[in-house]
Image (cartoon, rainbow, N blue to C red):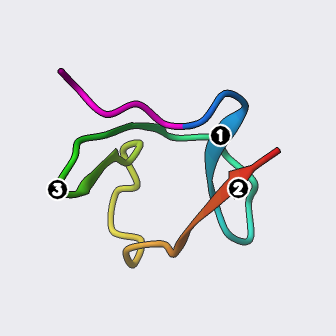
Amino acid sequence: MKCRPPAGARATVLGTGDEVSWRVSCDDVEVRLPELGDAAAPVVSFTVR
């Protein structure tokens, strides 16, 4: 049985507000970031509403 994020949970890139896809397992959180080219890795904010 997979763990699931709470309903309404979102992951966004700080500074731009771009939403990114993500999934939650029982052990960790995996975030798939959009293609950012040469930009430094962004900080991702997880928000539950």
Give whichever of discs 2 and 3 has the lower sequence position: 3
Give whichever of discs 3 and 1 has the lower sequence position: 1
Residue 33 in the image: x percent, y percent? 38, 48
At 22% from the left and 57% from the top, the residue drawn is 28
Asked whether disc 2 touches disc 1, contact meaning CB atoms under 8 Å apart, the reply is yes
Q: CA distance from mark 3 to mark 1?
A: 17 Å
Residue 21 in the image: x percent, y percent? 45, 34
Magenta stretch in the rendered image: 1-5
Q: CA distance from mark 2 to mark 3?
A: 19 Å
- State the image quarter where residue 15 is shown: bottom right
Question: How many numbered circles are shown?
Answer: 3
Amino acid on which the number 2 mark rests in the picture? Thr
Q: Secondary structure at mark 3?
A: loop
At 33% from the left and 68% from the top, the residue drawn is 38
Q: Which residue carries the number 3 mark?
A: 27
Q: CA distance from mark 2 to mark 1?
A: 6 Å
40 on left or right of 12: left
Amino acid on which the number 1 mark rests in the picture? Ala
Judge whether 39 appears above or below 12 on screen. Answer: below
Judge whether 13 appears above or below 19 on screen. Answer: below
Give whichever of discs 2 and 1 has the lower sequence position: 1
Q: Which residue carries the number 1 mark?
A: 9
- State the image quarter where residue 29 is shown: bottom left
27 on left or right of 46: left
Q: Secondary structure at mark 1?
A: strand
Judge whether 4 appears above or below 38 on screen. Answer: above
Say whether residue 2 is magenta.
yes
Q: Residue furthest top?
A: 1
At 39% from the left and 78% from the top, the residue drawn is 40
Q: Which numbered dot is residue 47?
A: 2
Amino acid on which the number 3 mark rests in the picture? Asp
